[in-house]
Amino acid sequence: MEEKIKVGMADLNVCVSPGILTTLGLGSCVGIVLYDPIKKVGGLAHIMLPDSTQIKNNSNLAKFADTGIKKLIDDMTKLGANKKRLVAKLAGGAQMFSFKSNNDLMRIGDRNVEASIKMLQTLGIRILSKDTGKNYGRTIEFYTETGELLIKTIGKEIKII
């Protein structure tokens, strides 16, 4: 039987095949999946904010794109993943509420996606696919056996990226 590991908000976890990583309720948060397709080691971070340097209470590394991705890589390499082989998939980063203001602080979903992409590019990790933005929440399941990311959204068909 496949192991299904739940990842909470501002949390991350890793596992090897045939494990399944899942997180619920990605709104403006971003689910970042990293995968080593040779060793079949997967990791999932459910980040809430783009940048740990902008927040005073930043001790939870999994909460931020900049620190969560690095921690995810560290944890995956301990399970045998090779950083040079890692690829990424992203989901979430929605704008759940509309605001009349164009204040950048209100665009948290977009900022989370932008920060995640920037950090992955900085670390040389190729992004295979993403399902981000819009105005709806997502629940994701990552299958380490196949590298498939299943995305569930209320009122929409299930996607696999």
Image (cartoon, rainbow, N blue to C red):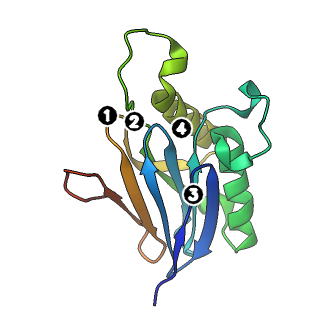
Out of 3 and 43, give the one closest to the viewer: 3
Name the N-terminal-most of marks 1 and 3: 3
Residue ID at (63%, 55%): 11
Quarter assignment of residue 161: bottom left
Which residue corresponds to mark 1? 134
For the point 51% across and 53% down, the residue is 88
Give the percent coordinates (x, y) of residue 22: 47, 64
Residue 39 visible at all:
no
As drawn, the label of residue 79 is none
Residue 159 % position (x, y) = 27, 57
The mark closer to the camera, 1 or 3, is 3
| Element type where label 1 sits in the image | loop
Q: Is residue 34 above or below residue 96?
A: below
The residue to which callout 2 is attached is 94
Provide the residue designation for mark 3. 8
Among the 4 quarters of the image, the one containing residue 149: bottom left
In which image quadrant can residue 147 be found?
bottom left
Disc 1 to disc 4, C-alpha distance: 17 Å
For the residue marked with disc 3, what is the amino acid?
Gly
Q: Amino acid at mark 1?
A: Lys
